[in-house]
Image: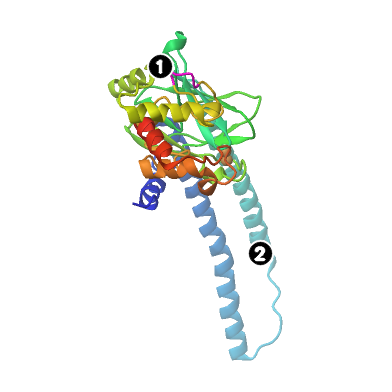
Amino acid sequence: MSAWPILAKAWEAHDALDAAGPQARKIETLYWFFLAICAVVYVITILFIVIPAIRAWSAARRRSQAEQLEVTTPSPGAEQRRATIVWGAVLLTVLIMFALLVGDFATGRALHAKPTDQTPLHINLTARQWWWEAEYSDAMPSNSVTTANEIHIPVGRPIEFELRSADVIHSFWIPNLSGKKDMIPDHRTKIWLTADKPGEYWGQCAEFCGYQHAKMRLLVIAESADKFEAWRGAGMQPSTEPLTDLQRTGRQVFMQHACILCHTIGGTEARARVGPDLTHVASRRMLASNWLPNRPGHLAGWIIDPQKIKPGTRMPQNYLRPHELRALLEYLEILK
Ligand code: CUA
């Protein structure tokens, strides 16, 4: 099955006007406030253009019917009326701009306010060309969970994202949950958000960051506190041990080829952090920063020739023999 229907569904779910949390709701309200004011201003402006034009046209018609060609000069009273209208419009414009500024400023302040009602869940999010690394840190290092491109959060609890970039400027944006926040190298920033409805919310890097900027997507899964804790608990576990010979061979293939140079698999000697942590890769819904569904066929295509799917990505082509690829896939599929 092609990836497109799944992606089309995902894009539908990308909507700043369908807020699923207090921060996004503030932005949505601001949007409608701006839109309403601008719509009224637009209509009034158009009326000021159209009504005089109609009047002038009908006056010209009357004049031509009467064959009167002399130019009429406006009376002093009409001049006065026009001046009043112009100055009134200037004053109104200033007031409207001020109202928009106040609305904008109040929303900005509300978004940057740290939530005080509950201790936020802290997630370190690092943007890289072209994927996201999420780390749920814990006072006990062995309880930290590192994952990529798919973030699980509990519904109703504020989340504090500490944002950083490992290379160029990226931008964090999950339209249903919050506004944008740039991720700048050597400059950590924070953003708070809360999801108040369970669901899957799509994010997208919102700052052009190179060739595969468009394929730098982020999936946020908001779920009940119980489900979240279960997910986190599973994430703390080391990787599943291979049981069959084929799975064992697959692990060997991983350790003896280029894979080990870039990836971590918890509980094995693979500890590199150039690419995503693969300890629980099989539990993730998608691959390649949410570009491909996580199915064996797509995974095989990705391993063999990632440059065809995301040209410029740091993952090289891998020349594996068919039986090696089969064993490797068999092994990766058990990493739930
Ligand atoms: Cu990262 Cu655009």
Q: Quadrant of residue 247?
A: top left
Q: Is residue 179 above or below residue 230?
A: below
The numbered disc on residue 325 is: none
Q: Residue at x 51, y 59 (%)?
A: 43
Q: Nearer the viewer, residue 258 or 275?
A: 258
Query: Residue at horizontal 59%, vertical 72%?
Result: 53
Question: Neighbour class for label 2 at 10 Å: few (<14), some, many (≥20)?
Answer: few
Splitting the image into four quadrants, where does ligand 1 fall?
top right
- Within the image, what quadrant is residue 109 found in? top right
Report x, y in % for residue 322.
Answer: 42, 42
- Is 23 in the magenta? no
Q: Position of residue 265 (x, y in %)?
A: 45, 23
Residue that carries the numbered disc 2 in the rendered image: 77
Nearer to me, 227 or 283: 283
Name the secondary structure under disc 2. helix
Q: Which residue is mark 1?
A: 117
Q: Earlier in the sequence, mark 1 or mark 2?
A: 2
- Magenta segment boundaries in residue numbering: 266-270
Q: Mark 1: is the Cβ under 8 angstroms from ligand 1?
A: no
**Residue type marked 1:** Asp
Majority secondary structure of magenta residues: loop
Q: Is 226 in front, or is 60?
A: 226
Amino acid on which the number 2 mark rests in the picture? Gly
Q: Spatial distance from mark 1 to mark 2, Cα to Cα?
A: 62 Å
- Say whether residue 196 is visible: no
Q: Position of residue 173 (x, y in %)?
A: 50, 37
Q: How many numbered discs sit on the rendered protein? A: 2
The reply to whether callout 1 and callout 2 are in contact (CB within 8 Å) is no
Residue at the spot 67% in from the left edge and 58% down from the top edge: 83
Q: In what element is the residue under mark 1? A: loop
Q: Nearer the viewer, mark 1 or mark 2?
A: 1
